[in-house]
Amino acid sequence: MNVHSILQLLVLISETKTQADLTAELETLMSGYGFDYHGVWIHDRSDKRLTNMMMVGRWPEGWRKHYKTKNYASIDPLRRMLARAQRPYRWRDAIQTFRDDPYRKRMMRLLQDASKVGLIDGYVFPIYGKTGLIGQFNIGGRPIDLSPVEMSLLDAAGRKMFWRLLEMQGIAADLETSVVIDPELTRRQMEVLKLLAEGMTSNEIARELQISSHTVDWYINVIQEKFHARNRQHVIATAFRLGLMT
């Protein structure tokens, strides 16, 4: 496989008329490179119509449910890397970045579980819009080395595919005007958020900070409103995505 295949996809993205055609072209490219799994995703948003949505792709059956059940989002090194990445990165590089993280044991369990379903290594291509990070193109499976040129071209293909799919689904304008999250928090709100991310309950946070549990709940509700989050888990995931937690 060579760069000409990616260049061909870049041309075909504009020419295809249906999502099925786009999916077929992407499948052909991924199969040629030997990647078992891939996905074009819209990033987490408060808009329920777009939240947690993989527009096209193929991912291990049952993995997303298992991932959610284990609450891996808060410690996932690939997801956390998105909060700081300005360019594409390889999975193993993101894992290395968090090698001294206090959640390393849980992180290793996540990696072991992922390997069992074939998600051993891969690449993430962040997609940005006017309001910041809005999506990603993710490819993975067995370890495959890509050249810098291939990385750059796949980055361009992922972005072009993302917006073409949004146009076909009639939601491109919605995403362009998505709500901007204000990450500014007070010192006390940051203290509560940090303890919440460590897995503490409201009562445990209250004892740690020597305040009432009702006050803790009030702080968490304020943070949740600022983040446009659905629940506490979403608050934690958003905090990592914004780089407030590492």
Image (cartoon, helix red, strand yellow):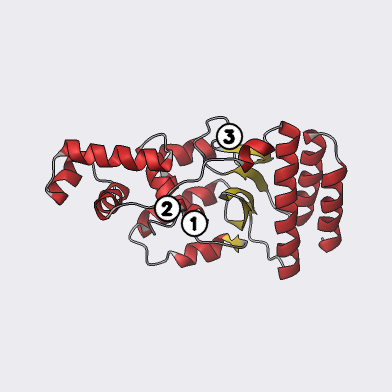
Q: CA distance from mark 2 to mark 3?
A: 20 Å
Coordinates of residue 56 in the picture (x, y in percent): 69, 39
Q: Are marks 3 and 1 in contact (CB under 8 Å)?
A: no
Q: CA distance from mark 1 to mark 2?
A: 7 Å
Mark 2 burial class by Cα count in 10 Å: few <14, some 14-19, many 20+:
many
Say whether disc 2 or disc 3 marks the residue closer to the N-terminus. 3
Q: Which residue is mark 1?
A: 83
Say whether disc 1 or disc 2 marks the residue closer to the N-terminus. 1
Q: CA distance from mark 3 to mark 1?
A: 19 Å
Mark 3 burial class by Cα count in 10 Å: few <14, some 14-19, many 20+:
some
Q: Which residue is mark 3?
A: 50
Q: Amino acid at mark 2?
A: Phe
Say whether disc 3 or disc 1 marks the residue closer to the N-terminus. 3
Coordinates of residue 151 in the picture (x, y in percent): 70, 63
Q: Does residue 75 show up?
A: no
Q: Which residue is mark 2?
A: 240
Q: Residue at x 33, y 60 (%)?
A: 102
Q: Number of callouts in the render?
A: 3
Identify the element where label 1 is drawn.
loop
Q: Are marks 1 and 2 in contact (CB under 8 Å)?
A: yes
Q: Are marks 2 and 3 in contact (CB under 8 Å)?
A: no
- Judge whether 242 appears above or below 59 on screen: below
Q: Does residue 232 show up?
A: yes
Identify the element where label 2 is drawn.
helix
Q: Quadrant of the N terminus?
A: bottom right
Q: Residue at x 26, y 49 (%)?
A: 192
